[in-house]
Amino acid sequence: MEELDATGLLCPLPVLKTRKHLLALAPGALLRVRTDDPVAVVDMPHFCAEAGHGLESQDEDGTVMIWVIRRGAF
């Protein structure tokens, strides 16, 4: 599973970096993303739904959100 640390970045950078990283992966591959921007709670699920990626899980580790995203076929 690929990893992306987007902590310390503010909207829209976590989503933009996630998008760029996902495009480099094969369809169906998993990406674990770490964010600490409070807006990511809204942005990440919206991005996944709009872009056709699967949001496999969303967990918290203190102030850090950990997202596991499955790259869509697009």
Image (spheres, helix red, strand yellow):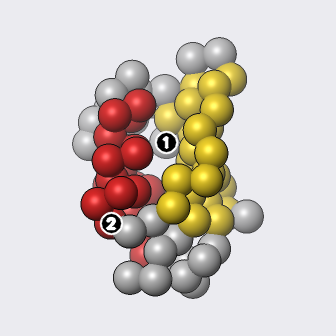
Q: Secondary structure at mark 1?
A: loop
Residue at the limit of the structure toward the right, as seen here:
1
The Cα atoms of the two marked residues, 1 and 2, are separated by 19 Å
Residue 2 in view (yes/no): yes
**Occupied quadrant, residue 13:** top left
Q: Which residue is pictured at 61% across the width and 53% down the height?
A: 56
Between 50 and 65, the one lying in front of the other is 50
Q: Residue 21 has which mark?
A: none
Question: Which residue is under mark 1?
Answer: 6
**In the image, residue 26 lies at what x, y percent?**
57, 83
Q: Which quadrant holds the N terminus?
A: bottom right
Say whether residue 70 is left or right of residue 40: right
Q: Which residue is pictured at 68% across the width and 23% down the height?
A: 61
Q: Which residue is pictured at 38% across the width and 82% down the height?
A: 74
Say whether residue 63 is left or right of residue 13: right
Question: Which residue is under mark 2?
Answer: 51
Mark 1: few/some/many CA within 10 Å (<14, 14-19, 20+): many
Residue 21 in view (yes/no): no
